[in-house]
Image: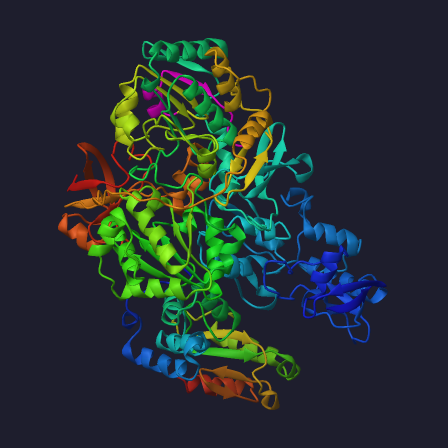
Amino acid sequence: MVTIEVNGRELKAKAGDMLIEVTDEAGIDIPRFCYHKKLSISASCRQCLVEVKNAPKPLPACATPVMEGMKVFTRSPLALAAQKGTMEFLLINHPLDCPICDQGGECELQDVAVACGSDASRFVEGKRVVPAKNIGPLIATEMTRCIHCTRCVRFGEEIAGIREMGATGRGEHMVIGTYIEKSIDSELSGNIIDLCPVGALTSKPFRFSARAWELTQVEGVAPHDSVGSNLHLHLRSNKVMRVAPKDNESINECWISDRDRFSYQGLYSDDRLTVPKIKQSGEWQDVTWEVALDMAAAGLQEIGEGEQIATLVSPSSTLEELYLAQKVTRGLGSNNIDYRLRQGDFRLDGAEPAFSWLGLKISEIENLNAALLVGSNTRKEQPILAHNLRKAAVSGAKVHFINPLQLELNYTAGQQLTTPAGMVQSLAAVAKALGATGEGAAAKVIDKAVADDDAKAIASALKDADKAAVMLGNIAAAHPDYSILCVLASVVANASGATFGFLAEAANSVGARLAGAMPHLLPGAKVAAEKGLDVMKLQKLPRKGYLLLGAEPGYDFWDAGLTRNALESADLVVALNTHTSPALEAAADIMLPIAAFAETSGTYVNTAGEWQSFRGAVKPLGEARPAWKVLRVLGNLLDQEDCEYTSSEQVRDELASLCEGVMPDNSVGKTESADLQSAVDGLIRIGDVPPYALDSLVRRASALQQTKDAAPAAICINAEEAKKAGLADCDSAVVTQDGREATLPVSIDANIPDGCVRISAGLAGTETLGAQFGEVTLEKA
Amino acid sequence: MNTIEVNNKADIFSTEIRGEIDQWVAKYPADWKQSAVMAALRIVQDANGGWLTTELMNDVAAYLDMAPIAVYEVATFYSMYELKPVGKHKICICTNVSCMINNSDRVVDHLEDRLGIKLGQTTEDGRFTLKEVECLGACGGAPMMQIGKQYYENLTPEIIDSILEGLE
């Protein structure tokens, strides 16, 4: 530690820290543009010049390390003159278009110009103009306003891990951009909007729609992955105008994914459900809440037998909604409730951990020395976790993937590309290389495995690492042999001394377990005396009545075709949804409009087990109501006991008391069945869920739907397999799965292993198909 | 991905060009391949009639495992790289201080008149390109110009005429 003096005030600082870090910590304001706490130091804008005693010239605070006895003056005549001089130069080419600039009112350049600038310009020469380039649907550019701080360039290289922007040209001709006409494709790209200190990079969907001073800011929690990034929602006239990150060093630092930033557009899509509707002789009619709820309650009571009722809930629902959904369901005498809509293998039920989680804190990921990810497209599934994983990899961690897709990664990692059945064998081979034998199903699979060089490399990386982790992602959770993968991953973790964890799919996948939204678990992750049926059985053995919460048939289920059959044969389907769709209208009998993201209060439990509550930011659209209130009223109408909640906090606190002392735990029990359901004779479908097809809201976020990651459904297959099937790129082909068909374009993709065809789920055109992972046949259309 | 994926680097450039670039790559430590970017761009430009296309820059990026934008940055920074087609003879006229004092304006005027083009343009027959450049370090012989790799100093209209007549 050293002692320095700033403006006469004594400060303690760590030797080697930059001056600006110390003054920021102490709350002493120094103007800056290029400096950003999360980016490397470029010291190019010179706005942070300060006077340091005995230095011949003013020094940039961002690039001056503190030294014992240093005397600094940030507001001395010399410092102010230097800052004013820099500001004059920065402004010579900056247009005076603040009245039509989206950044106006929240612009760092405006703020610093007021503080340090002159009231008149001495620059009489012509200002330069830089033509704007189209860099995609999310970010608007106005590069004439750019002051060359290079924050966006450094962000691309250091945080997003894709160097897409750069500084081309020289001197007065230098411009920041992509040089060629090209979209910025990083899943974190929107953060450069926040980083840009001027109006050069602004939000395209938000463009010209509001001024900063008209907006009110409230806090929120991101609903699209299990990170629970902290948000600032910017509102005007009861409308979410845009979303920005809220700093939370232990979760999302100061970043959010594009999905969390731009999904709010889906709130105002044309197919938002705003009025309760009932279907009468095939026609949808708008009705009042009273009528709709009475009908729903009467219908559910009419079914009589509890086990004939099934409640299928989206894991993006809040904790309160999930808790009340299970309460209403169990009140009807049914344990048939499940949130695992995209899971296909339930052989682990009973032996799986009740309160499964990441296994470590989110901020600990960057300290890992080795990681093995099984069935995970981390970058697209959980962008913020992937950013942390990248930090670990960049500082030397050995990261390996076992996947049925070759991933585009922004760091060096080992990737084992194999079929779904091959994934099980690869993981078993790692276990074998570690000398583990396992029990039950695991023992059978490991026994047959051959520890090849790849497996040995992964095994030794995990074993030799100080801190290692084995994690299962979304693809693993939807794998037909999830139970075996889970057991094997646990065996590998135990044998190598690594942490075992789950990268949960949705905002509340972990919370759903605590809320008891499972057929065999009660709230507080307690084992139910009487077990209900899992989501798969609830569809294979159709029930008479279904209650859907936030789940869209056709898109949110593992086997879209199966869901449709089950729902269409039911007597009553009550859907509590935010949006409607043809598939939902075909399946449902009663549609109750519920509040969406930002419209309801609630709680999410993220994958690290952290509870984060939020308030409703805006009133629900139209007559939509928060789902917890709808469920409570439904409970009242069904004469259920203890259903008199007046606030969502009351619901949360009741659940919290039931969860007291419940600790996260990833220990996996034994299973017996070692039958590989993923072993098929022909082609197997890889039905991953693309990032912008995840839930009702993002599927309707128009700007996100124009990005590269939102490609329409296609049959992606490698050249070899395409040749065997007699298909060529751009052909149209008929894919048949379980007797159901879809016609889709063919796309030759070298990232798909032999024996596999990638037909992503959750996309328009795939609603008619079957399981996310299952045998398919292809035929030229 | 950071860099352009290429299955086989032998598919990029001819054997001769690859050989030349490899000589430059060998001058730097193994993990500092991108240090050869300037030489690689020059070699590729020379082989392409004196200018670089975006595709060629992408090829250089792929060959040296760099992000394409990093190559564009280099190619746009240095004035010796041409990003548009140039004539067979690229005439670079220095108009910097020493040459300006020694009447480089007369050199520019004369060349513009004789060739019928302005600075930055190329003659219709594709033979000549006129380019204004900063100091080329030959102030002792100001005013001067560079054609191809050759310097011509102490220029007068007569000398310029005889130089141009001597060119193919």
Q: In the rendered view of the protein, which quadrant contains the C terminus of chain B?
A: bottom left
- The magenta span reads A581-598
The quarter of the picture where the N terminus of chain B appears is bottom left
Q: Nearer the viewer, residue A259 or A422?
A: A422
Where residue A683 sits in the image (x, y, percent)? 18, 46
Where is residue A421 shown, x and y percent of the image? 23, 49
Please, is residue A169 above or below residue A624 in the view? Answer: below
Q: Is residue A747 visible?
A: no
The number of numbered discs placed on residues in the rendered structure image is 0
Looking at the picture, does residue A89 appear above or below residue A132? below
A615 shown above or below A750: above
Identity of the residue drawn at 50% across and 87% down: B151
Q: Is residue A65 left or right of residue B37?
A: right
Residue A484: x percent and y percent? 28, 46
Q: Position of residue A285 (x, y in %)?
A: 41, 11
Residue at 32% of width from left, 12% of height from top? A282
At x 53%, y 23%, the residue is A621
Q: Is residue A300 above or below residue B155?
A: above
Left or right of A451, for residue A319:
right
Q: Residue furthest bottom?
A: B140
Question: Is A24 or A182 nearer to us in this picture?
Answer: A24
Q: Left or right: A393 with respect to A98?
A: left
Q: Does residue B107 show up?
A: yes
Q: Check if residue A266 falls in the magenta segment.
A: no
Closer to the camera in the image, A744 or A172: A744
Residue B110 versus residue A680: which sits nearer the camera?
A: A680
Asked which quadrant contains residue B104, the reply is bottom right
Coloring basis for residues? rainbow
Q: Is residue A143 left or right of residue A476?
A: right
